[in-house]
Image (cartoon, rainbow, N blue to C red):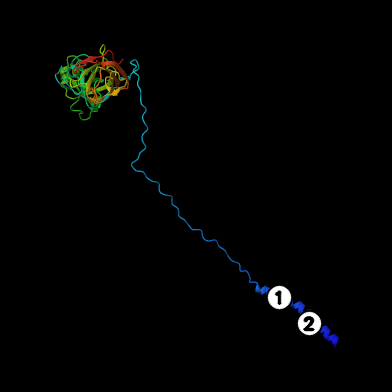
Amino acid sequence: MAKLCTVLLAAVVLLSLVVSPIDCTRKLSKAKPKTKAVSHRPAPVAKVTHKPAPAVKVSGHKPAPAAKPHRNYTAIPSSPSTVYGSGGWLSGAGATYYGAPNGDGGEGGACGYQTAVGKQPFSSMIAAGSTPLYRDGEGCGACYEVKCTTNAACSGQPVTIVITDRSPGDLFPGEVAHFDMSGTAMGAMARPGMADKLRAGGVLRIQYRRVQCKYPGVNIAFKVDQGANPFYFNVLVEFEDDDGDLNAVDLMEAGSGAWTSMAHNWGAMWRLNNGKRLNAPFGLRLTSDSGRVLVVNNAIPAGWKPGVTYRSLVNYP
């Protein structure tokens, strides 16, 4: 009996050792919370609508134009000139005459040549030009060949005339240019003995073209205006060969060494009045219509007088 109890007790102890670890393991398993899987989504990216700042619109601003290069001309009288008269004849011009039938168109005129129009080298072969020819006076002195064929009295042969005035009527209907000629110049386009008939023809249709001016044996002249004084110099430039007209005139005072631009006054007149007393003698630099330059040293003497004409020793070749 004692042995039986001992055996039973040993069995109970053995059974408790076997069961206890298992139960402890289960308790520990229950004590440990199950980890719950978390479905993680990143926070949505904020949607930013980005518009670039509008370009600043600058109104009224234009980049400064590139400076034009300054052209320095050298006075080389033998340099080649613009060849006028090499092109074809232009049509669409009209012609009338004014003044006496065999006269010079009358003294004066919008170029300022006055009585010179009836003397050599103009010799009354002159005309008042319409706006495209007169060019606000800068066309004064330009030479043209003209001829007519639309009237029975027309010879069809060209004659050369000089612009010395502005046409008061400007353009007649349908014209591109108008020459209001002296009676002498108009008659020169006629057949022999038919000058009066041609002059009585009213407004003639003529052909024309620009040509070189040629004044053999005549040099450029400078006529000082009657109103000129030591503070206001005003001069008429006439008888330029070649182009015949000028685009610019510059003056150099005695001892200066620098050229001063003169202003185009009216007609063939150029002036300088800068508020200072001008020291003579004066050199004059002439720039022709085609850009040719001619320097006339001592063009106006130290003791110059208003109303006097001073003839130079040079001309455009």
Secondary structure of the residue carrying numbered label 1: helix
Q: Residue type at mark 2?
A: Val
The part of the image, by quadrant, that contains residue 11 is bottom right
The part of the image, by quadrant, that contains residue 275 is top left
> Quick check: 7 above or below 257?
below
The spot of residue 14 in percent (x, y) is 79, 79
The spot of residue 245 in percent (x, y) is 26, 21
Furthest-bottom residue in this view: 1
Q: Residues within 10 Å of mark 1 (few under 14, many from 20)?
A: few
Q: Residues within 10 Å of mark 2 (few under 14, many from 20)?
A: few
Residue drawn where x is 80% and y is 83% of the image: 9
The spot of residue 170 in percent (x, y) is 20, 28
Could you tell me if residue 156 is visible in this image? no
What's the mark number on residue 249?
none
Q: Residue type at mark 1?
A: Cys
Front-most of residues 230 and 106: 230
Furthest-top residue in this view: 217
Front-most of residues 101 and 234: 234
In the rendered image, which residue does mark 2 sit on?
Answer: 12
Q: CA distance from mark 2 to mark 1?
A: 18 Å
Could you tell me if residue 22 is visible in this image? yes
Secondary structure of the residue carrying numbered label 2: helix
> Quick check: 34 above or below 63?
below
The part of the image, by quadrant, that contains residue 210 is top left
What's the mark number on residue 24?
1
- Quadrant for the C terminus in the image: top left
